[in-house]
Amino acid sequence: MTGLKYVLLASLLLSQAVHADDSPNTYVSTPYIGLRYRDSTLHQDNLSDTGHAHTLRLQLGYLWALTPHLAAYAEGTKVWSLFGRQYNDTTGRRTPYPAEPDPRSSELSSAWIGYADDVFGIRAGRQYLNLDDKRFFSANAWRQNPQSFDGVTGYLKLGNTTTLGVDWIDQVNRTVGADFPDIHQRRWKLDGKLLHLDQALPLGTLTAYGYFIKNLTLASNSVRTEGARWTGNVPLQDGATRLSWTLEAAHQNNYDNNPNRFSLPYHLFELGYGLPALSARLGEESLGGNGHTAFNIAYGSGHSFDGWVGVFSIPPHGLLDRYGGVYGDLPWHKLTWQVTYHDFQPVTGSGSRYGDEIDAGLRANINARLSLELQYGDYRAGSFSVNQRKLWLLAEYRYGKQAI
């Protein structure tokens, strides 16, 4: 990481930005300890061996509050594979088993210096980047090795209801971890500019964005994505129930050094309705494809979309995911649950439906620091891949607050 460049740039900008004010403290010095154990049971119809992945992640971080608005943060992540590796960790060493891409790794996962107040903020260094619903840019928190970005990010309040975000990133440190055998998969060198404008409305928030990514390591991931998103919720029936929605449309083109030529659409429609204890949602996400190239989500999250089993890298004919589910709360240990059904089809071409999937999850927050979680996904193949089932059991302990 070209950390010195970031620190010097941040120091120059911060010297202009730091000023005395009476706003509440933004930063407080605090340590962070995160420990997550995951037991994954993996079945795939075309493989005779069932996979068993036992992985443990330890994260140690510390936030130094240099002033109420100026801080520095550093965090390391270590991932172990326990009880042998009876799963394909995607390093190519355990191929007879189903895949769970959580290889062993040790890395500096976050290291930044930043300033933030009610009007202006800037952060320079290695950091997690989560935009909107995390579809296009995400830390990929589901994976044991998080994804981080090296660069300079910032925001500026243009008024009480308008916020402009401007980011420059020159490297993505991917979820395969820092010890992955293929160095070109560990990290990609980038020249990325991200523009993000949020406008609060009487009903919800309207977001406009433009992401311009030149990938110097893998040119086929150089893309330009521009779009808009409207999210909101309103109480109904004297506040007894709530209606929520997300409407998003985007378009993606090849950018700069990408050798391919494409112009692909994207949309997401989602509607939710219900009580806190029991609610339902219906949605449709469409990622375009022209038969040769699909909509690129290389820097975003996958597990929260397209089903939990993780069958899909977006196929060349695109992916249409129509889904519906129910979710809610139970009174014991702040227990939350959800069940979702997905129907997968191509966006273009005359191919038959890809398949469908049922996902079910249960999470118990034992106390403020300890949580237990169960997730199950069952993908039933149509014209794409093979039947797959995955069961995850997680136990996570957190002390302090992670600076993200």
Image (spheres, rainbow, N blue to C red):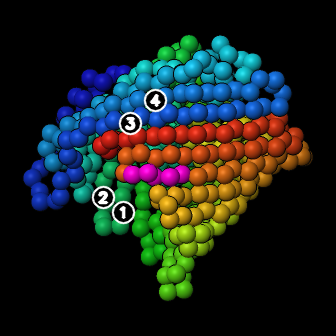
Could you tell me the amino acid type at mark 2? Answer: Lys
Q: Is residue 180 magenta?
A: no
Q: What element carries label 2?
A: strand
- Please provide the residue range marked out in magenta: 363-367
Q: In which quarter of the image is the N terminus?
A: top left
Q: How crowded is mark 1: few (under 14 residues within 10 Å), some or many (20 or more)?
A: some
Observer-nearest residue: 177 or 293? 177
Q: What element carries label 1?
A: strand
Could you tell me the amino acid type at mark 3? Answer: Gly
Residue assigned mark 4: 57
Residue 394: image x %, image y %?
A: 54, 40
- Using residue 27 as the reference point, say whether residue 340 is left or right of it: right
Could you tell me the amino acid type at mark 1? Answer: Thr
- Using residue 114 as the reference point, say whether residue 307 is left or right of it: right
Observer-nearest residue: 182 or 157? 182
> Which picture quadrant has residue 58?
top left
Tag 1 or tag 3, which sits nearer the N-term? 3
Residue drawn at the location 55% of the way across and 78% of the way down: 241
Q: How crowded is mark 2: few (under 14 residues within 10 Å), some or many (20 or more)?
A: some
Q: Residue 162 carries which label?
A: 1
Tag 4 or tag 2, which sits nearer the N-term? 4
Q: Do the residues labelled 4 and 3 touch (CB within 8 Å)?
A: yes
Residue assigned mark 3: 34
Tag 1 or tag 2, which sits nearer the N-term? 2
Residue assigned mark 2: 157
Q: Are marks 2 and 1 in contact (CB under 8 Å)?
A: yes
